[in-house]
Image (cartoon, rainbow, N blue to C red):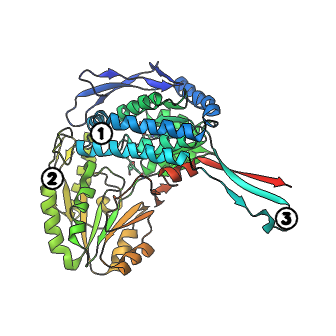
Amino acid sequence: MVTKTATAERLLIGGSWVRSRGESYPLYNPYDGSELAHIPMATPEEVEDAVRAASEAFAVTEVTPAHERARRLNATADFIARDREVLGRTIAAEAGKALKYALAEADRGEQTFRFAAEEAKRIQGETVPMDAGRGAENRMGFWIRVPKGPVAAISPFNFPLNLVAHKVAPALAAGNSVVLKPASATPLTAFHLGRLLVEAGFPAGSVNILTGKGSVVGDALVSDSRIAVVSFTGSPAVGRGILARAGLKRVILELGSNSAVVVAADADFAKVFPAVVNAAYANSGQVCLSVQRLYVHQSRWREFVERFLAATEALVVGDPLDPATDVGPMISQAEAERAESWIEEAVQAGAQVLVGGTRKGAVVQPTVLVGVRPEMKVMCREVFAPVVSLVPFTDLDEAFGMVNDSPYGLQAGIFTESLDTAFAAVRALRVGGIMVNDTSNYRVDHMPYGGVKGSGLGREGPHFAVEEMTDLKMVVLNL
Ligand code: NAP
């Protein structure tokens, strides 16, 4: 919870809120620079304590009945709903997310826990027709799913509640224990969730929360042989490093993208607007699914650009805690300066800014670029800022080719009234999810979610995350 006086936060290890023996760092509100809290930087001994606590607690969690795991997950969801306002304001204060989106994230976090509670009750196996193999006629066989072991959950700053929920809730649903390392920029929401998990009755050591530098605390977790699963959401560079160091454990990587949306000649603009505008600028474009590249059929170009610019200019930019705000600051001034330099670089190489393009502190004005080329950073890398590039096309195959011309492949969107065109996109686009008459940014929390190519490995969504976090155990009866 955010207080007027900065609080000294504690680590959650083995069921106790522990005052760290290490240093701490000040956490600031990225919009007004006010100090929110002092955050501990876990020492190597505290990382060891947390991993040991999670390993010992696994002996308890793996035998906890499904109905009890589900009850606790549902209780956590109840508490998230009860604390919606506090959670929303905490997210807005530490992440700079506009309050309306922060409250929506609290609602999604509640739902993610409920989906996980339901999954806890349907972790099923299957029989195997053993007699299909010669010589196995008298065998009966079936497989069951068992929890894999302690999960290291490493989360990014942009969804401080729901992306933590997508790791912690399925891990607990599956009967695992967890060590959570939230992003250094957004630990307060994670600590609040930790208090709710304790209140919901999860046993000591089943959920541990460590803060501190990812390159120290995160790295120590990833390299520890007692950790069975690393569930990471974050940048592609860090994800690649984790995969290289993790060794023999399950690694789930939800990484970035430079997501694209195609607006076909027959698109219904009542469906296109305001969806594309919200999907480009929500959370200042700091969403892995943000619309970054918009390919618009030449026949609709003028009308589209006119409406897109008008809607962009109408956005309210400012204090994230003001309920009227649409777009708040980016996570830091350094990140905003990085985005500004990418815009400048594109302009120097021939792009034009139609609206926005300016920065004040950590706030980047929603920006529309045209005249871009594929090799510009704003096109080929993940911009992760309120910056969108509009590109006209004449031929659908050409548009699909441009969408696929990316090292990433998380989700893509297409607006069309034709089923043929929709299915052509489904066939052609190399992504983890295709949204027809929605943007790349569309997600419901129980669907399988994840990318191909440089966007990662594995899938989230509680049902799919539970699969990733369990092992198959085969049983054969010789009768
Ligand atoms: P990040 O810098 O990669 O950090 C993510 C997490 O990894 C943080 O907790 C970070 O800790 C930790 N970390 C950093 N270095 C580490 C290391 N060497 N070993 C282990 N952990 C380490 O990402 P971010 O800036 O927070 O988030 C933005 C990125 O996340 C974007 O690329 C975005 O596309 C991606 N993302 C993807 C999805 C998806 O579902 N596909 C969803 C949301 C965001 P510190 O904070 O202490 O550095």
Q: Amino acid at mark 3?
A: Glu
Q: Secondary structure at mark 3?
A: loop
| Front of the two marks 1 and 3 | 3
N-term-proximal mark, 2 vs 1: 1
Q: Is residue 36 above or below residue 307?
A: above
Q: CA distance from mark 2 to mark 3?
A: 69 Å
| Front of the two marks 2 and 3 | 3
N-term-proximal mark, 2 vs 3: 3
Picture quarter with ligand 1? top left
**Residue closer to the observer: 97 or 28:** 97
Residue 137: numbered disc: 3
Residue at which label 2 appears = 315
Residue at 61% over, 47% down: 470
Residue 395: numbered disc: none
Q: Amino acid at mark 1?
A: Ala
Report whether residue 121 is seen: yes
**Image location of residue 195, percent across then percent down:** 42, 28
Q: Secondary structure at mark 1?
A: helix
Q: How many neighbours does mark 1 have within 10 angstroms: few (below 14), some (14-19), or many (20 or more)?
A: many
Q: CA distance from mark 2 to mark 1?
A: 19 Å
Report whether residue 355 is seen: no
The yes-or-no answer for disc 2 within 8 Å of ligand 1 is: no
The quarter of the image holding the C terminus is bottom right
Q: Is residue 328 above or below residue 12?
A: below
**Image location of residue 314, percent across then percent down:** 12, 55
Residue at 25% over, 33% down: 29
**Image location of residue 386, percent across then percent down:** 24, 53
Residue at 15% over, 66% down: 307
**Residue closer to the observer: 426 or 457:** 426
In the figure, residue 125 lies in which quadrant?
A: bottom right
Residue at which label 1 appears = 95
Q: CA distance from mark 1 to mark 3?
A: 60 Å
